Amino acid sequence: MTANATLANKGRPAAASRAREGSPWTGLWAVIAKEMADHLTSARMRILEFLIVLTAAGTVYGAMQSLKGAGAEDRFLFLRLYTTSTDPLPAFVGFLGFLVPLIAIGLAFDSINGEFNRRTLSRLLAQPIYRDALLLGKFLGQLGTLSLVLSAIWLLIFGLGLLGLGVPPSSEEVWRSLWLLLATIFYGGIWLALALVCSVVFRQPATAALAAIAAWLFFTVFWGILGGLLARVVSPVRFGTVQELVAQAQSQLGISRLSPNTLYAEIMVGLLNPGTRSLGLILPAQLQGALLGAPLPLRQSLLLIWPQMTGLIAVTLLLFALAYALFQRQEIRA
């Protein structure tokens, strides 16, 4: 019996090592499920959900009061639920650009440093879970939580619209709203990845949260001012000609598009205002022959916003790659 027990104990490390030599994504779905369960049942998430539900209900109710006299002849009545504002509340899309980054940062600012401070990271990685699966699982779990919350808000808006307006949305309105939901998820993914980077870099969750919020405030408040100053340096106006003014305006637009806020705002304009034909600078000569005010088909609107959508996805991937590279270089001790 003693010899058999000794042989069994000798085989256990070999079996564990074979289990860890499997796919680097071993345990990915377990991490995703655990992350989503923790977030959806946490007090922090319930507070954020209450804020965004209250905001959605208030702004949509105010929009419905303004749209009751529009009637069914308005082709894009449901889309106007997102863009109609009533004093003192702004439009719902204005609240989205403000609340989504805060929700994303609130989900991810303590993803890694929280494990360090609780001293559970070394125990977690002692299981057959690789660093790759841990970091990706945390990010996908947070993104899944954010997607679930935003999808619930999307359904809430449509339900309130059906009850308040009494007019069903057209198929094009549904598809445009679905693309807006997808763009909002990608927009939130940028701030999730940024908060994840801060969580890897800073060991204190409060410092990581402040760094992520500071970055959000910089792009929200100061980037537009900085873009105007940089455009004057890159494309100065010396003689006041039309070419110089156009070049400076294009430079300012290009610099402003380095901000995810600008990209998301342009996507909302292209999707929720079907009459939009360009998101850049338009000269009067370029409008000759165009039927002004006529809505674009959904396909043309998607082609118009496709560069902005690609930019949101690319920035998310770059920030996650940065967090991955930094996390792989960190030393983790028991």
Image: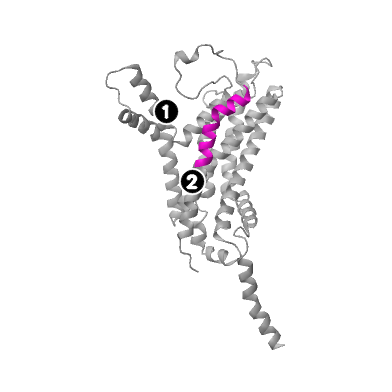
Query: Would you identify the image quadrant in which residue 172 lies?
Result: top right
Total numbered badges shown on the rendered structure: 2
Q: Is residue 196 left or right of residue 10?
A: left
Magenta extent? 297-314
Image position of 284 with respect to 322: above or below: above
Which residue corresponds to the image point at 61% horizontal and 28% vertical from the top-left?
60
Q: Amino acid at mark 1?
A: Leu
Image spot of residue 150 (x, y percent): 61, 38
Q: Is residue 323 left or right of residue 83?
A: left
Query: Can residue 333 be seen by looking at this rendering?
Result: yes
Which residue is tagged 2?
A: 318
Which mark identifies residue 253? 1
Which residue corresponds to the image point at 39% horizontal and 31% vertical from the top-left?
224
**Residue in the foreground of this view, choosing between 254 and 63:** 254
Q: Is residue 202 left or right of residue 127?
A: left
SS at mark 2 in the image: helix
Q: Residue furthest left?
A: 238
* Magenta run includes residue 303: yes
SS at mark 1 in the image: helix
Which residue corresponds to the image point at 61% horizontal and 70% vertical from the top-left?
17
Query: Can residue 105 be seen by looking at this rendering?
Result: no
- Decide: few, some or many residues near mark 1? Use Cα within 10 Å; few <14, some 14-19, many ≥20: some
Q: Amino acid at mark 2?
A: Leu
